Amino acid sequence: MPPRAGSEDEAWQSFWGIVAGSFVWTGGVEYGLLFAARRFGVPTVHGTSGEYMLLEYTAGLVLGLVAYLLYQESVRCTLVLWLRRKLPLMRGPAAAGPVHNYGPRAAFEAFSILWFFYVVMLIAYDLGIHSWATYLLFITSLGGGGYALYRLYHQRGWGMSLRYAFPTVILVWMGVEVLAKWKVFTEPWIAIDVPFMIAVVLAFLFMAYLLVDHLRHRDERFVE
């Protein structure tokens, strides 16, 4: 059976792109705001740390990013496509030329998704932990997360599945974050439950091993 050119490359490019985007967010944004909050003495408000209070005020930049994506017709994000249809901004079939490297695209996706949903969540918290905005966030995150899980189940190919899985996890996790804010349960990393944290790290390492092993053996089958 001849190899499917580019399919395994797409999966690896997507995987490393998501990793890179997440590291850029954590190292370049979260730690930068953490140091800024400490330097300027930004206080913790309603249980929200100073760095996240600063992050909330980047909402204007997020709006600029969203506006750009709405008019960039090569973007295939489900949320962006839905907004285009509703506003309406659809001028015709989206420009969908060949993508030769999914790494930068996946990195930008991971970075922008983290940024967007962080700001949305912080604004909802600022309006009140038990406000209508937080309840709306909880409903849309779990409802949208369930829909995204359904769509993820029907994706074909590892590359597309990886790129779709990242926003799916973020949506579902926002619902978990809201439940923690409502004190439905105690976040284990706050309680410093060492065995639980070790188990989580091992689980992610096991998942990474399964992914790498699958891709390696699939590449071998294609060569044969």
Image: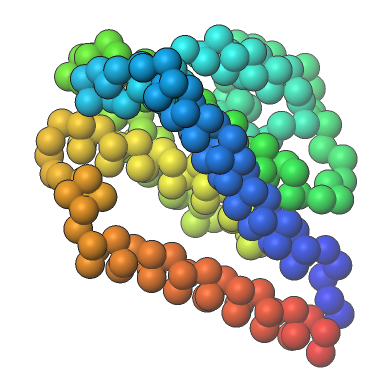
- Residue occupying image coordinates x 31% and y 67%: 198
**Where residue 119 sits in the image (x, y, percent)?**
44, 22
Query: Number of callouts in the render?
Result: 0
- Residue occupying image coordinates x 40% and y 24%: 38
- Residue occupying image coordinates x 58% and y 46%: 23
With 188 as the anchor, is 94 left or right in this view?
Answer: right
The reply to whether residue 54 is in sight is yes
With 139 as the anchor, is 166 left or right in this view?
Answer: right
Q: Quadrant of residue 171?
A: top left
Of 10 and 92, which appears nearest the observer? 10
Residue ranking furthest to the front: 39
Q: In which quarter of the image is residue 133?
A: top left
- Tell me the quarter of the image containing the N terminus: bottom right
- Residue occupying image coordinates x 72% and y 42%: 105
**Where residue 208 sits in the image (x, y, percent)?**
52, 69
Q: In which quarter of the image is residue 181?
A: top left
Compared to residue 40, the image places residue 38 above or below, namely below
**Where residue 192 sits in the image (x, y, percent)?**
21, 53
Residue ranking furthest to the bottom: 224
With 65 as the anchor, is 6 left or right in this view?
Answer: right
Look at the image and name its color scheme.
rainbow
Compared to residue 34, the image places residue 219 above or below, namely below
Compared to residue 185, the image places residue 48 above or below, namely above
Of 222 and 177, which appears nearest the observer? 177
